[in-house]
Image (spheres, rainbow, N blue to C red):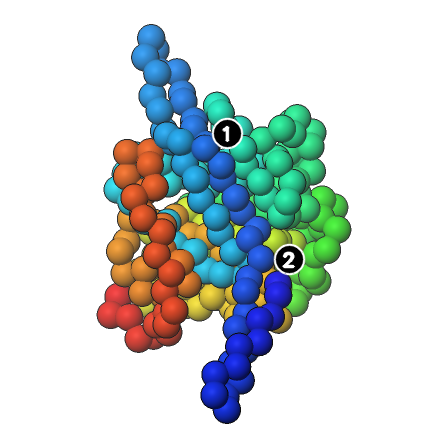
Amino acid sequence: MSIIFLKHEMNIIFKVRRKSIVELKNVSKTYKIGDNDFKALDDVNLSINKGEMVVVLGPSGAGKSTLLNLIGGMDTPTSGNVIIDGENISKYNENELSKYRAENVGFIFQFYNILPTLTVLENVELIKDVTKNGVDSKEAIKAVGLEAHMNKFPNQLSGGEQQRVSIARAISKNPKLLLCDEPTGALDSATGVEVLKLLRKQCDGRNGDNTVIIVTHNSLFADIADTVVRVKNGKIESVTANPNPKKIDEVKW
């Protein structure tokens, strides 16, 4: 991150230029479906800045989840380069991708992916052995407001509470990238608002250099994002900076 000093008459303006953390250069992804090729992404170029909340919007089948999977190292491009914090992960082998995911990426999905036979604390502690810069599991649980439920099992929790467990597990890694695929899709609007507040804190709080990327079809998310990326038919339609994102409570969900 660099700081530019601009002098205008008697006022000094401090302008922060954020460093890019994600760069996609001429990225395409083609899947074989029977005898046919399906191009999920088509020559995509995209840059995402560190410390932002980025919302990727588009209809079903637009390529949103494929984009997220490539950034997260869950898949590799057919062509082009995926560069994360200066490293070209599209050249990584499977072991290198596994290490990249463990050390840099937190995932949050629509369905919570927590283990039913483990308590809240045990679910969050699962990632302790695979990350270097993690935060204390109990602190992560406290951050999502579940400190009173640490020893409960998933079937003793509401849907919103289970999603908070998955968020606690993801943020306990202190990931550079927090990748969210429809994170509020299975929740009622009030619970979804609370989840979005937790995600926003990853950009605005003490983890201010962490980056949150949310894939959704809900256009209201554009109001709270720092940057909005619109995807259609495997192509980037637009990338729009939002200089004044709304507070989450200001949006009529």
Where is residue 197, by image quadrant?
Answer: bottom left
Decide which of 8, 239 is in the foreground and name it.
Answer: 8
Q: For the residues marked 1 and 2, what is the alpha-carbon distance in whole angstroms?
A: 28 Å
Residue at image location 37% in from the left, 72% down from the top: 244
Residue at image location 38% in from the left, 60% down from the top: 241
Q: Residue furthest front?
A: 9
Q: Is residue 186 visible in the rendered structure shown here? A: no
Q: Is residue 53 visible in the rendered structure shown here? A: yes
Residue 194 vs residue 134: left or right?
A: left
Q: Which x, y percent locates residue 171?
A: 59, 58
Residue located beneath label 2 in the image: 174
Frontmost of labels 1 and 2 is: 1
**Amino acid type assigned to the residue bearing label 1 in the image:** Gly
Relative vertical location of residue 151 with respect to residue 92 in this rendering, above or below: below
- Name the quadrant of the C terminus: bottom left
Residue at image location 47% in from the left, 66% down from the top: 200
Disc on res. 80: 1
Relative vertical location of residue 215 with respect to residue 62 in this rendering, above or below: below
Q: Which x, y percent locates residue 227?
A: 40, 58
Q: Secondary structure at mark 2?
A: loop
